[in-house]
Image (cartoon, rainbow, N blue to C red):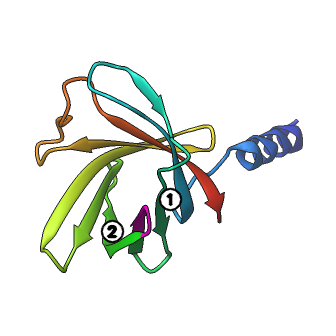
């Protein structure tokens, strides 16, 4: 009986998906303050890449921005641009294999009343 329980627990733990921001993500859609959803236009490219060494790179239609990222235990993603000394905070979560970012202020409140989500799909691990 004890071995059966251990076996079940082992299988249960193995089946849990573990998501990470590490990799290259492409914007697939976004949602505005009023809840309207926009699918990415083919003429618009927004990629964000997170590396294991806490560096990130954003590419907006070929224009590159890079800096340092930090993740807190409360699902807060902090993007730090050392060139212009700016920090942007996001609440982040995963839905299936998609990364969802909602910009927040220093108090953790959404910048938009109902959230302005950026939804990314992973294209490289």
Where residue 102 appears, x then y in whole percent? 32, 40
Residue 44 position in % (x across, y down): 47, 51
Report crowding for label 2: few under 14, some 14 to 19, many 20 or more residues within 10 A (C-alpha): many
Q: Quadrant of residue 5?
A: top right
Q: Where does the C terminus fall, quadrant-wise? A: bottom right
Circle 2: element type: strand
Residue drawn at (28%, 19%) of the image:
34
Q: Residue sitting at 43 percent across and 61 percent down?
A: 61
Q: Are marks 1 and 2 in contact (CB under 8 Å)?
A: yes
* Side (left or right) of 99 relative to 65: right
Answer with the quarter of the image where residue 123 lies. Answer: bottom right
The image shows residue 63 at horizontal and vertical percentages of: 37, 70
SS category of the residue bearing label 1: loop
Toward the front, the furthest residue is: 43
Which of the two residues, 84 or 39, is positioned nearer the viewer here? 39
Q: Callout 1 environment at 10 Å: few (<14), some (14 to 19), or many (20+)?
A: many
Residue at the image position 69 percent from the left and 44 percent from the top: 16
In the picture of the structure, the residue carrying the numbered disc 2 is 69
- Does 112 lie within the magenta span? no
Marked residue nearer the N-terminal end (1 or 2): 1
What range is drawn magenta here?
58-62
Residue tagged 1 = 21
Vertical placement of residue 81 versus 37, above or below: below
Quarter of the image where the N terminus is located: top right
Q: Residue at left 51%, top 41%?
A: 41
- Residues under labels 1 and 2: Cα distance? 10 Å
Q: Which mark is residue 11?
A: none
């Amino acid at each position: 009986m004890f071995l059966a329980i251990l076996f079940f627990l082992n299988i249960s733990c193995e089946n849990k998906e573990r998501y990470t921001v590490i990799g290259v993500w492409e914007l697939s859609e976004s949602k505005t303050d009023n809840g309207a959803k926009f699918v990415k236009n083919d003429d618009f490219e927004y990629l964000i890449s997170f590396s294991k060494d806490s560096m990130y790179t954003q590419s907006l239609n070929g224009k590159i921005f890079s800096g340092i990222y930090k993740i807190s235990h409360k699902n807060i993603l902090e993007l730090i641009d050392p060139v212009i000394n700016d920090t942007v905070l996001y609440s982040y979560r995963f839905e299936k294999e998609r990364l969802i970012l909602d910009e927040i202020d220093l108090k953790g409140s959404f910048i938009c009343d109902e959230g302005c989500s950026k939804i990314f799909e992973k294209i490289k691990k």
